[in-house]
Image (cartoon, rainbow, N blue to C red):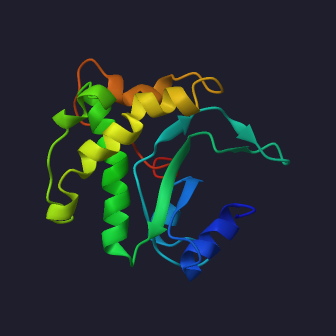
Amino acid sequence: EAVNNEHAFRLLHEGSVDIIAGVMVTLERDIREPTTGGRFAFTNPYFHNNDAIYNGRGVREGVDLNLCLATREDDIQWSKYVYWIVEATFFAEQNDISVDISNEMPIVNLFGKELARMFRDEILAVGNYGDIYRRNVQKYVPRQGRNLLNRNSNPGPQLYALPGLLEV
């Protein structure tokens, strides 16, 4: 188990783990992670927390906390697989697809015929993003703000600027 994010990125970089969860994607980390100098692939954020966090010097940090899964960028197929698994939970929620109607998820050939039902099987096993959130997070952090992006009554592009990109 990693003791902090820096340790987690080192473990991922050296290949001791295949994926890390609960890390924040930033523009810097997307280009070159500073602890390892390595390159990593990130999913879209699966959790947002807009609460300000102050460090010991009184400086505001982590204002736009977004939590993602990270994989090694050089493992392209695994990184894409993880990315699409996360995206499928968002898609299912946007389209009101849950466990009981998981067969409404699309059949895909992203990873070959053997995994054509991957999205249907995933939603059958764990449900959509909202289902997962309710089971695991809702009692600790009520769902609000950006965590409701998938429930937009007027769906369209979900634009999200990485933290650090728009700071002046």
Residue 125 lies in what quarter of the image? top left
Residue 98 lies in what quarter of the image? top left
Residue reaching furthest to the bottom? 14
Percent x, y of residue 83: 35, 56
Whether residue 37 is visible here, answered yes or no, is no
Task: Identify which residue is drawn at 56% across, 71% down.
Answer: 17
Task: Identify which residue is drawn at 37% across, 29% down.
Answer: 149
Task: Identify which residue is drawn at 14% across, 63% down.
Answer: 113
Quadrant for the N terminus, please.
bottom right
Residue reaching furthest to the right? 56
Whether residue 150 is visible here, answered yes or no, is yes
Does 116 sit left or right of 79 as displayed?
left
Task: Identify which residue is drawn at 85% across, 47% down.
Answer: 56
Residue 131 lies in what quarter of the image? top left
Does 103 sit left or right of 53 as displayed?
left
Reply above or below: 18 against 103: below
Q: Count all numbered tags in the image, as a single digit.
A: 0
Does 1 sit left or right of 118 as displayed?
right
Between 160 and 72, the one lying in front of the other is 72
Percent x, y of residue 123: 32, 39
Between 9 and 85, the one lying in front of the other is 85
Reply above or below: 133 against 1: above
Between 73 and 117, the one lying in front of the other is 117
Reply above or below: 104 against 161: above
Between 155 and 162, the one lying in front of the other is 155
Reply above or below: 78 against 63: below
Percent x, y of residue 11: 62, 74
